Amino acid sequence: MDYGKFTLEELKKGYRFDKDKEAYVCIYCEQTFPAGQIFSMDGHFYMAEHAVAKHIAKEHDGSFTRLVNADTKYNTLTQNQRELMTLFYSGLTDSEIAKKSGISDSTVRRQRFTFREKAKQARLYLAVYEQVFEEHTENENAFIPIHDKAIYVDDRYLITEQEKHHILETSFKSLSPLVLKNFSPKEKKKIVILGKIAEEFQRERHYSEKEVNEILKPVYEDYMTLRRYLVMYGFMERTKDGAEYWLTV
């Protein structure tokens, strides 16, 4: 999931409003809830915005749980910090948390203070960053996002939107249906090509190796290379025996 494309409020709620679709969309599985419709859930009826919130709580254990336990390089919380955050979120007092964690009340208060100071630091940085890079930079000069499971995070990801557009235009015979000319040995091109091919798969779905092959064959004759690199570069994961594949971006 690309955390950079969502606002802070959308990340906290776990859903966004798509103006084009006029629907609320779950950011975890992209299930849509058209505005104005009534949804029946667990014997009750909900308007779209309440329905998507109920969906996130039931199907994804709530947005807080997904965020605090997110398996991504952007989640820098240690396991102990994640557990403490979860206890704070539950509404327990410092004394109750201390007893539950086997630490002193003062240690709990110190950690609460540290969390607060880090949040202030993050807000200041975000305010500065957005003014510099989002308000005064043309979109074509913006860097493409780095997906959560990227294995080799280095200069190969220094790709602007303009470069991405050029690579797509020159690397594919057709974008609809997707047909690749050749799989370039250049790292930047590999990343853009693989990112585009990954869009052929559905999030939250597991595929057999045969199903993966059937999707990749029309894209490029050497579909086994594509399958291998999708895993190598973190766009997909698979079980150890290769029986199941799934999208990670």
Image: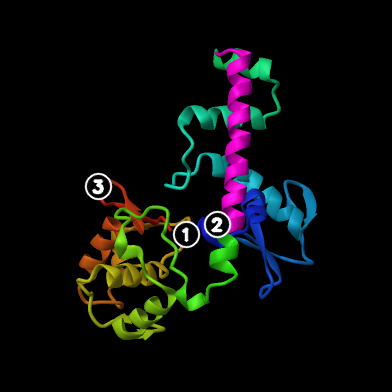
In whole angstroms, how far apart are the C-alphas of marks 2 and 3? 26 Å
**Is 1 in the magenta?**
no
Work out whether residue 178 can be spotted. no
Label annotation for residue 29: 2
In whole angstroms, how far apart are the C-alphas of marks 3 and 1? 21 Å
Give coordinates of residue 118: x percent, y percent: 57, 38
Mark 2 and 3 residues: CB-CB less than 8 Å, in contact? no
Q: Nearer the viewer, residue 48 or 19?
A: 19
**Is 110 in the magenta?**
yes
- Callout 1: helix, strand or loop? loop
- Callout 2: helix, strand or loop? loop
Q: On screen, 116 above or below 121?
A: above
Mark 1 and 2 residues: CB-CB less than 8 Å, in contact? yes
Q: On screen, 199 above or below 1?
A: below
Left or right: where 44 falls relative to 120 = right
Image point 49% across, 36% down: which residue? 77
In whole angstroms, how far apart are the C-alphas of marks 1 and 2? 7 Å
Mark 3 or mark 1, whichever is nearer to me: 1
